[in-house]
Structures are given as structure tokens and as C-alpha cells.
Image (cartoon, rainbow, N blue to C red):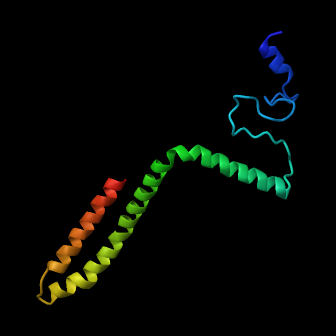
């Protein structure tokens, strides 16, 4: 009898690839669920939730730096997206009145340059 025949005899009768004792075979992917319970009790749900969190953590841990960099990039992009409307408010409230009164255009130009800078940073972050 070959090794494949021996392994197939030990599989779960439902034919889902599980051994008869319900544990995953050696070499199976560790994320395969082995529970076939319809109604999960509170303690079993907590156990499964904790195991799922540990599995997710172990799968994501090699990519921690990349995930942190992407998170920072998302925060920068969102901050620049929110800066646009605020800078328009500042330009209208503090840049136009001095210009209308015959004063300097410097506050309006400064605000417009900051707005363009925010747009450029936002586009680079995308």
C-alpha cells in the first residue's frame, strides 16, 4: 500500500481533507479552519477569535514596516486633502480684504503657494 493510499484512508469521512481526529495534516496551510460546529458557544467563539487574531498577526508581521509606511502615506495624503479647503478659507478671509483695501497681495500669494504645495504633496502621496 502506498503512502498516498494510507493517507487517504485516514481522512475524515466527509472528504474535506481533514484527518479523522479533526487536526490539519502536516504541511496543510495553518489558516484552514477545522471546526464544523454550527452553533458556536461564547468560549469557543472567544478561542476562535483569539486564534484568528494571532494568525493575522503572524501573517502581517513580516510586512510591518511596509504597512506602517503605507499608513503614514495615507495620513499625509488625507491631511493634504483637508488642507485645501482650509487654505481657500484663509485666502478668502485674510488674503482678499487687504487686497480690496488697496493693501499688499502678499497674504493671498502666500496662501495660494501653500495651496499649490498641498496639492503637489497630495499628488505625490497618491
Give the residue displayed 43% in from the left and 53% down from the top.
69
In the rendered image, which quarter contains the N terminus? top right
The number of discs equals: 0
Q: In this view, does 64 lie above or below 114?
A: above
Q: Where is residue 103 in the image (x, y as percent from the top left)?
A: 12, 87
Q: In this view, does 32 lie above or below 73?
A: above
- Quarter location, residue 27: top right
Q: Position of residue 47 (x, y in %)?
A: 78, 52
Q: Residue furthest bottom?
A: 101
Give the residue displayed 26% in from the left and 81% down from the top.
92
- Quarter location, residue 102: bottom left
Give the residue displayed 19% in from the left and 80% down from the top.
107
Q: Residue furthest top?
A: 1
- Quarter location, residue 6: top right
Q: Nearer the viewer, residue 35 or 109?
A: 35
Q: Where is residue 106 in the image (x, y as percent from the top left)?
A: 15, 78
Q: Position of residue 114 (x, y in %)?
A: 24, 69
Q: Which of 44 and 125 is in front in this view?
A: 44
- Decide if residue 58 is on the left or right side of residue 123: right
Give the residue displayed 85% in from the left and 23% down from the top.
10
- Decide if residue 53 is on the left or right side of residue 75: right
Amino acid at each position: 500500500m502506498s503512502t498516498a493510499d494510507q493517507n487517504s484512508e485516514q481522512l475524515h469521512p466527509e472528504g474535506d481533507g481533514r484527518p479523522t481526529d479533526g487536526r490539519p495534516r502536516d504541511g496543510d496551510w495553518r489558516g484552514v479552519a477545522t471546526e464544523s460546529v454550527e452553533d458556536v458557544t461564547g468560549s469557543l467563539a472567544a478561542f476562535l477569535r483569539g486564534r484568528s487574531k494571532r494568525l493575522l498577526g503572524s501573517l502581517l508581521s513580516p510586512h510591518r514596516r511596509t504597512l506602517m509606511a503605507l499608513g503614514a502615506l495615507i495620513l499625509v495624503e488625507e491631511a493634504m486633502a483637508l488642507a485645501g479647503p482650509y487654505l481657500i478659507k484663509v485666502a478668502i478671509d485674510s488674503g482678499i480684504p487687504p487686497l480690496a483695501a488697496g493693501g499688499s497681495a502678499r497674504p493671498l500669494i502666500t496662501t495660494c503657494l501653500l495651496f499649490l504645495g498641498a496639492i503637489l504633496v497630495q499628488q505625490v502621496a497618491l
